[in-house]
Amino acid sequence: MQVSVDRDRCCSSGMCVMNAPEVFDQDERDSLVRLRRTTLRPDQFEAVGLAAELCPGGAITVTADGTDRTGT
Ligand code: SF4
C-alpha cells in the first residue's frame, strides 16, 4: 500500500499528523504536509486510511491493489 500527498491541496490542518505521525509531518516553513514514508506497513493502513478520509483538503491518496482512496 502506497500513500501520496498533493501539497497544492493541503490547508495545513494537521489532521494527518495527529492520526498517523509515523507517516505524516508538517513542513516547519509553511506547515504544509510532508511524507515521512510512502510505502506503508500493514499496521499503518488503518490510521493512514482514516487520515485520508478526514483530510479537509482531500490531499491524501492511498493506493492499494490498483484502487485509490482519497479524502474527497
Ligand atoms: S490533513 Fe490534509 S490538509 Fe491537513 S495537513 Fe494533512 S494533508 Fe494537509
Image (cartoon, rainbow, N blue to C red):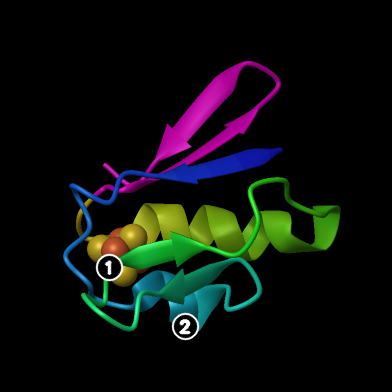
- Magenta highlight on residue 67: yes
Amino acid type of disc 1?
Leu
Task: State the residue in front, 37 or 18.
Answer: 37
Q: Magenta segment, which residues? A: 58-72
**Which residue extends farthest top?**
66
Give the quarter the ligand 1 occupies.
bottom left
Q: Which mark is residue 60?
A: none
- Judged left or right of residue 40, residue 41 is right
Query: Does the magenta stretch mainly form a helix, a strand or a loop?
Result: strand
Judge whether 22 appears above or below 51 on screen.
below
Tell me if mark 2 has few (under 14), some (14-19) or many (20+) residues whose alpha carbon lies within 10 angstroms of its own.
few
Which badge, 2 or 1, comes first in the chain's sequence?
2
Residue 68 vs 69, above or below: the answer is above
Placement of the N terminus among the 4 image quadrants: top right
Residue 21 shown left or right of residue 13 in the figure = right
Which residue lies under the disc numbered 1?
32
The image quadrant that residue 70 belongs to is: top left
Is the distance from the Cβ of mark 1 to the nearest ligand 1 atom less than 8 Å?
yes
Which residue is labeled 2 in the image?
18
Identified by mark 2, the residue type is Met
Dot 2 lies on which element?
A: helix
Mark 1, Cα crowd under 10 Å, few <14 / some 14-19 / many 20+, is some
Question: Which residue is rendered at x = 44% and y = 63% of the image?
Answer: 34
Q: Position of residue 66 (x, y in %)?
A: 63, 16
Q: Is residue 61 above or below residue 52?
A: above
What residue is rendered at 60% in x and 64% in y?
A: 36
Q: Quadrant of residue 29?
A: bottom left
Report if residue 68 lies within the magenta region: yes
